[in-house]
Image (cartoon, helix red, strand yellow):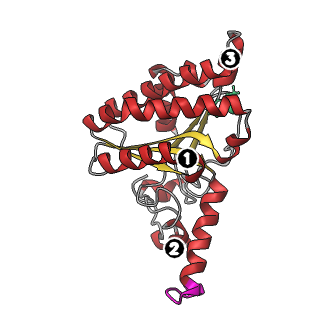
Amino acid sequence: MDGNGRWAARRNRPRAIGHRAGARAVNLCIDFCLERGISALTLFAFSSENWGRPEEEVGALMKLFMGALEREVDELHRRGVQVRFIGERAPFGEAIAKRMLAAEALTSGNTRMTLSIAASYGGRQDIAQAARALALEVAEGRMRPEEIDEAAVGARVALADLPPPDLFIRTGGDLRISNFLLWQLAYTELWFTDRLWPELDADLLQQAIDDFASRERRFGLTSAQRSGEAPAIVDKAPGPDIMSG
Ligand code: IPE
Ligand code: MG
């Protein structure tokens, strides 16, 4: 979700106003996904690097975050949304961390859509903590080093229980991943737009989905294999959703 600051600057308003407009776009995006029956939405709300922004901006973001937790969670629960947070909790402080935990507990049984909020999240940090978890298991004799494979790492990164993302959308014109779900995005279709995050609307999201639907996903195989005209050696193919993606 990129471009809040530029959206505000174009209006000669403080960056915090851009973030507030960005929060409206978040609600629009959630509504869209619920209407379309999309089962998992992950939003990159705040990166581990964003703590380095000016104190005033970080403060405004935390206020916005706390406000959203207070206002939106009950409604999300009522609509059958499971809310979770990925990333480091501790830096947010007790009040926000408690609210996050409460939101997760309240909505943990919901199945209509999983909404994951990446907050103080970094893709490298995610992979590093998976490596640390594996190292600990080996050190404690619960695992052997030769058992460490893609599945073992994949089971220890964030969102391990969800299918890998089908579509990645970045607003704001920059053509990079910026340390989002590095492991999980290996076979995700990437979609970029110059439109700023607060300018998001249903038409833009539909454009992204239409573009996604027109792409051929081969997961490292040939077209003929993917269409079933030639046999696929499924064991050797990447990605757990190899025959359905
Ligand atoms: C994204 O908008 C929101 C957060 C990182 C919280 P930016 O704040 O990065 O907006 P620009 O890139 O400065 O326009
Ligand atoms: Mg930015």
Q: Residue 68, how many percent across, how many down? A: 45, 31
Of marks 2 and 3, the one in the foreground? 3
Residue 55 point in image, percent of width and height: 71, 33
Q: Nearer the viewer, residue 45 or 165?
A: 45
Looking at the image, do the residues carrying marks 1 and 2 touch, with CB atoms under 8 Å apart?
no
| Residue 209 appears in the rendering | no
Proximity of marks 3 and 1: CB atoms separated by less than 8 Å: no
Q: Which residues are magenta?
A: 138-148
State the CA–CA distance, disc 3 to disc 1: 25 Å
Q: Nearer the viewer, residue 183 or 240?
A: 183
Position of residue 28 relative to residue 155, above or below, is: above
Dot 1 or dot 2, earlier in sequence: 1
Image coordinates of residue 13 in percent, x first then y, are 67, 12
Label 1 CB, ligand 1: below 8 Å? no
**Side of 213 where 31 appears, left or right:** left
Q: Indicate which disc, 2 or 3, sits on the residue closer to the N terminus.
A: 3
Q: Position of residue 93 (x, y in %)?
A: 55, 47
Q: Is residue 78 left or right of residue 226?
A: left
In front: label 3 or label 1: 1
| Mark 3 or mark 1, earlier in chain | 3
Mark 2 lies on residue: 152
Give the Cα separation between the discs numbered 2 and 3.
45 Å
Disc 3 residue type (three-letter): Pro
Q: Residues within 10 Å of mark 3 (few under 14, many from 20)?
A: some
Label of residue 93 in the image: 1
Residue 130 falls in image quadrant: bottom right
Residue drawn at (37%, 28%) of the image: 31
Per the rendering, the mark at residue 14 is 3
Residue type marked 1: Gly
